[in-house]
Image (cartoon, helix red, strand yellow):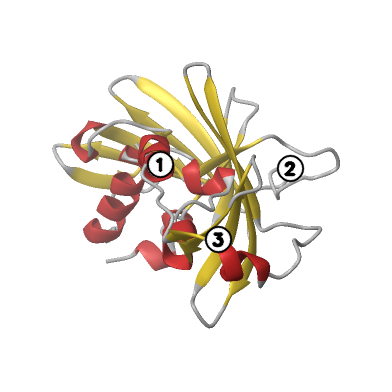
Amino acid sequence: TKVQSLVEDYANLKAQRKLEGNDLAELPAKSDTPQMTITLGAGEQTVDLTVDQLNSVADVYYVYDESGAAYTVRRSDLATLSKSPRDLYKAQTLTDKTTDDVAAMQVNDLTFTCTDGIWTLADDPDYHLDASTCSTMATALSSLNAKRQLTAETGEDYGLTDPAVTVTVTANGQTSTFAFGTENPVTGDMYVQKEGDDAIYTVSGNKAACFELTKADLFG
């Protein structure tokens, strides 16, 4: 897992060398705002490390332990240790079906049914639907994975009060409804909420793009 991999990276962290003598005397003063602080625990033992300034010429960071001893650690070795909660989030499956399981879909005001692998519009069964587009929507719904989960912030709407797209999927006799809100302008991901679930999720923007089609767009 991502967390296990991070723990292993911490456990395997090695100093390039310990600074002593003239090297120690020539160190710049410690900064008031270190780059990172690390606490490692194993049983009853703990080790506290402070990652301070970068030596851009040698491409190393000065790192201090709790005794004040100073070391150099390669910047590349520390780069993999700087993680945000978003980096460590395990993708969560919002739907866990196969495409063949999907028997019906409702996308906004369009309702689709599948019989013997053929998709039709419920209110216009003779309408010639693009089979590939319908399959793309069914595939997106059969394996909808959240990239991360959010706790809704007070006053934030995420575009879910008046969602851009509302999709209901029926598979194996179970029905789930998803509201797709606004796009995160930084990541390009879309905010999603599952009916009956208070959590807000983000999914890849292209997951929602396949649903933003009109009846005319679906003609094939």
Front of the two marks 2 and 3: 3
Q: Is residue 18 visible?
A: yes
* Label 2: how many Cα within 10 Å (few below 14, some 14–19, many 20+): few
Q: Quadrant of residue 21?
A: bottom right
Classify 156 as above or below 31.
above
Can you identify the residue that label 3 sits on?
Answer: 20
| Numbered badge on residue 145 | 1
Where the C terminus falls, by quadrant? bottom left
Circle 1: residue type: Asn
Say what secondary structure mark 2 lies in: loop
Q: Amino acid at mark 3?
A: Glu
Q: Which of the 4 image quarters holds residue 92?
A: top left
The reply to whether discs 1 and 2 touch (Cβ–Cβ < 8 Å) is no
Is 168 or 58 nearer to us in this picture? Answer: 58
Q: Quadrant of residue 105?
A: top left
Nearer the observer: mark 3 or 1; the answer is 3
Residue 135 is left or right of residue 7, and the answer is left
Q: Position of residue 31 (x, y in %)?
A: 77, 62
How far, Cα to Cα, is label 1 from label 2?
22 Å
* Sooner in the amino-acid sequence: mark 3 or mark 1: 3
Q: Which residue is mark 2?
A: 161
Q: Residue 42 at x, y = what percent?
A: 46, 23
As measured in the structure, the alpha-carbon distance from the residue carrying label 2 to the one carrying label 3 is 62 Å
**Label 3–label 1 contact, CB within 8 A:** no
Callout 1: 10 Å neighbours few (<14), some, many (20+)?
many
Q: Nearer the viewer, residue 98 or 111?
A: 98
